[in-house]
Amino acid sequence: YKALVCVFLFGGNDYANTVVPLDDMRYTTYSHLRGAGAGAGLVIPRARLTSTELRPTTALADGTLYALAPEMPEMAALFNQGRLAIQLNVGPLVVPLTRAQYEAGILPRPPKLFSHNDQQSVWQAQGAEGSTRGWGGNIGDLALAANSKAMFTCISVTGNTVFLSGQNALQYQCSKAGSVAIEAIRGNQWGQFFYVPGMRSMFEQLVQQPQTHILAEEYNRVMRRSLLAEAQVSAALGPVQLNTGFPTDNRLAEQLQIVARLIGARNALGVKRQVFFVSLEGFDVHDNMGTRQPALLRRLSQALGAFDTSLRELGMVDKVTTFTASDFGRTLSVNGDGTDHGWGGHQFVLGGAVKGKAFYGQPAPLSVGNSSAPQDQWHVGQGRLLPSTSVDQFGATLARWFGVAEEELYGVLPNLGNFGERAGRPDYPIDLGFMRS
């Protein structure tokens, strides 16, 4: 059994106040750039970062040090224990790109940069809003044959998502409580009469009867499938109770708790490969960032810490890999008391199969200038990071661990052929190295 869990941070997480520079030189630059025009309100005091300092097994070059935001002690501990890795400066790319090429417009770039809905879609499906197939669903397509109950290959606990849509794989949607009943049968404030046993029984029969009209039959076929899936999930989850305490008043933790229970029910659900999608909203911090982002990062850290504990309880910590994604990073420069839309950002990878206690990729210089100086070549203005690692490389590394064959990777991630040795770009490898084989 193996599972991938995508934790999507909707709104665009600010990278510089999540993975925070800590060494003297970089912290001084960070403080200067973040303090300009904001009354230093977005600068995290250095003394508050000592408890979340990250201690990689192999030190970064030039004495570079990082800490996580003070609200993330659980994730800092997971990093220092070796189960969490950080991929630096990753984001959507069509081809490897320099700032000069970006400004000249001579090479393709992702569509509709800096747009929330479009970049969410580009991260999940390599195309702007309206895309119909995501790379999680493409992975799911390849896993269907391994699962006796293929319906439960791709599961979202946060509503509809293009990430889990494949050619054949369908996303099964759960709530934080488990399976979602058909409202008309379950009854609600508009239809309480369905609690009358006779009426409910008649309605269940009606929606399951074969129909001669093609559209009516398709509707009833979906109804029959939904009723069966609801019964199977409810029965499978019943015996799976966790001792792990998940934090309350934390929507992400509630989603991850049901994911853990679904993983615990994997045998009853007839699955050997699964892809999950959960999310946390609110990261569009144009204002009041000093209050809003820390609260969100606290929820993220507490939720992932509890999820890791639950997987250890289930004995599945090395079988499940969890990773974060977000619309985009944000500007290094400030906008009053917030930051604006960016491009590249830092993402986390968690699990027993992760080569943790390590950074992957290259630390980007801290700069907001527009000169020809080297430090200005890895952003596209205001400290918007130009990704040095593509989502396709990131996804390919995860997919390979999941069991996707080398040749199949290029179908899962359409732009992957523009990276790696095949494309003459070994400096953009298709395996980033953060997963164990």
Image: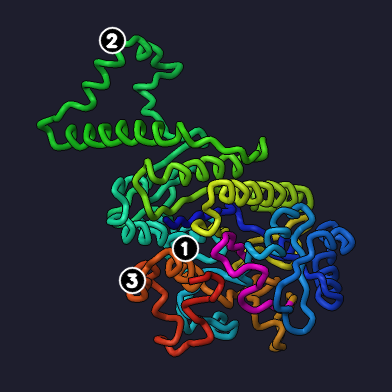
Residue name at image x 27 percent, y 32 percent: 223
Circle 2 crowding by C-alpha within 10 Å: few under 14, some 14–19, many from 20: few
Task: Indicate the quadrant containing the N terminus: top left, top right, bottom left or bottom right.
Answer: bottom left
Q: Is residue 389 above or below residue 300?
A: below
Residue identified by numbered label 3:
408
Label 3 sits on what residue type?
Glu
Element marked by disc 2: helix
Of the numbered discs 2 and 1, the one sitting upstream in the chain is 1
Could you say which disc has been placed on residue 122 in the image? 1
Position of 69 with respect to 400 (left or right) is: right
Question: What separation in Å lies between label 1 and label 3 (alpha carbons)?
Answer: 20 Å
Provide the secondary structure element on which disc 3 rests.
Answer: helix
User: In the picture provided, is 386 more to the left or to the right than 71?
Assistant: left
Please state which of residues 406 and 175 is positioned toward the viewer in this rendering.
406
Q: Contact, CB < 8 Å: mark 2 with mark 1?
A: no
Lower sequence index among marks 1 and 3? 1
